[in-house]
Image (tube, coloured by chain):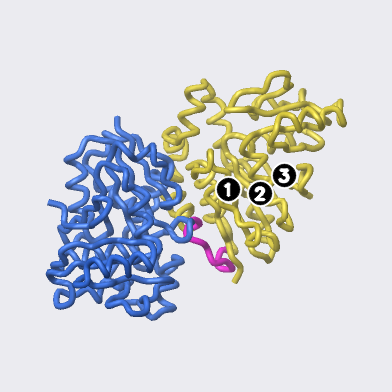
Chain colours: A yellow, B blue
């Protein structure tokens, strides 16, 4: 049996538990979807960073790269793009590198950089993600990014969907949070939109007038794009 | 609207969020059930402590009190009772005070000692707990004790059952973990026993040969006992 450990937040990741296996990182609102969309629209690579200063330093090394990202859900001053996936159109990102500064999603990726393989997931690519997972025999971690150290409903439900759709689930021992994620996904799966409007981040995005982002970020199984992170850059997984 | 905040672990409690309201503490395996059983069987009061040394110090002040508790699920050397609720019979505890040293349950109680009112819950007394909650108009916290800082399935499902049975739920804004607890309870409510055998603590108790404790601790709505904690002692709430 392998372990399938779902972490409620990136802060709760235990490095010793993840370093020999596979890690799947989820930040539904919105970093996962922005990354998936950018790669789907032809971006060459994405360099995730946590700090704005680091983004500017990388910009000096890669002056042709776009700057994208957010602080408190809002676009950073002087940046080309925010953290709405709807901004990452083919026109803007095709063939480009992107330096991507998000407070939470980037730190979630860093929390698993010691894993053997790191993939980025959201509802949009769960079919493709589960297919790839099924080809790997190893312990697996699903890291829900969470919000300021607390569990997020949207990330946990996406984790639950991965578990629900794994045809190789009998190979794994699920941890308690995985059983919670799976159970609540099964309960809410026919009303994901209505349920996520009640979530902390759903309410926050509504307050910011970002209903289109909510709707975009919860679309299910619409792309085969699986972003892979090598500790430095995110590129299309082959 | 009041806030109904479910915390996945006692470590995640934010004191500023709980100090003006009501707190319900849950440690299904097994402190909640031991406390409920002891009071149901006539114990006078229970003094919860985290450290074994503190227990012995209190024993000097109250030489007639019983010593109960556990370390790593096992009875402490020299103590009268362990942490199995089945040990707390009327014959043993009726009319007695109990000094109760548990690593997790006691710390969970301490984490909310600033709340206006603190009650102890498990599946056994949820009917009585929800009835009492419905008489209070204030913010409410439900603290799942968790295990070594990670969420526990059994505590979270019991929290979900409280939410599910609150007739005054429309008065509250639920946090994300509350929505997860509620959803997973609805999914698992008809198979609580089978589901909890897969949980970390369920597996641990099975390994220790404590199947009777598991069965005892998940009995639902069998008592009106609501233990109340005043920062020092747990007694029957009137």
| Residue at the limit of the structure toward the top, as seen here | A78
Q: Determine whether label 3 and label 2 are within 8 Å by CB.
A: no
Q: Which residue is mark 2?
A: A111
The residue nearer to you, when weighing B159 against A54, is A54
Residue B27 pos. (x, y %)? 34, 60
Give the crowd class for mark 3: few <14, some 14-19, many >=20 residues within 10 Å: many
Percent position (x, y) of residue A136?
70, 62
Residue at position x 42%, y 57% in the image: B146
Magenta span of residues: A169-178
Tell me the quadrant of the picture where the N terminus of chain B can be found. Answer: top left
Which corner quadrant of the image does residue B167 belong to?
Answer: top left
Q: Which mark is residue A11?
A: 1
In this view, A150 is above or below A206: below
Callout 2: few (<14), some (14-19), or many (20+) C-alpha neighbours within 10 Å? Answer: many
Q: Determine which residue is flagged by label 3.
A: A227
Are the two marked residues, 1 and 2, in contact with CB atoms closer than 8 angstroms?
yes
Residue B168 x %, y %? 23, 38
**Mark 3 and mark 2: Cα distance apart in space:** 16 Å
Number of callouts: 3
Considering depth in this image, is B207 or A158 the residue closer to the camera? Answer: B207
Q: Residues within 10 Å of mark 1 (few under 14, many from 20)?
A: some
């Amino acid at each position: 049996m392998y372990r399938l450990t779902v972490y409620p937040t990136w802060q709760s990741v235990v490095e010793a538990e993840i370093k020999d296996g596979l890690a799947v990182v989820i930040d539904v609102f919105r970093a996962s979807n922005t990354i998936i969309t950018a790669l789907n629209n032809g971006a060459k690579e994405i360099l995730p960073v946590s700090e704005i200063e680091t983004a500017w330093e990388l910009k000096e090394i890669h002056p042709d790269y776009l700057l994208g990202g957010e602080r408190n859900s809002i676009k950073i001053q002087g940046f080309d793009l925010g953290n709405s996936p709807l901004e990452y159109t083919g026109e803007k990102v095709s063939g480009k590198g992107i330096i991507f500064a998000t407070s939470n999603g980037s730190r979630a990726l860093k929390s698993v950089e010691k894993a053997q393989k790191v993939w980025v997931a959201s509802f949009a690519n769960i079919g493709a993600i589960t297919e790839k997972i099924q080809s790997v025999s190893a312990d697996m971690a699903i890291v829900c990014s969470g919000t300021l150290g607390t569990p997020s409903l949207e990330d946990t439900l996406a984790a639950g969907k991965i578990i629900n759709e794994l045809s190789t689930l009998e190979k794994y021992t699920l941890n308690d949070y995985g059983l919670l994620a799976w159970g609540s996904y099964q309960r809410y799966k026919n009303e994901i939109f209505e349920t996520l409007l009640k979530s902390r981040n759903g309410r926050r995005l509504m307050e910011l007038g970002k209903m289109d982002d909510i709707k975009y970020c919860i679309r299910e199984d619409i792309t085969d794009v699986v972003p892979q992170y090598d500790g430095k850059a995110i590129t299309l997984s082959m």
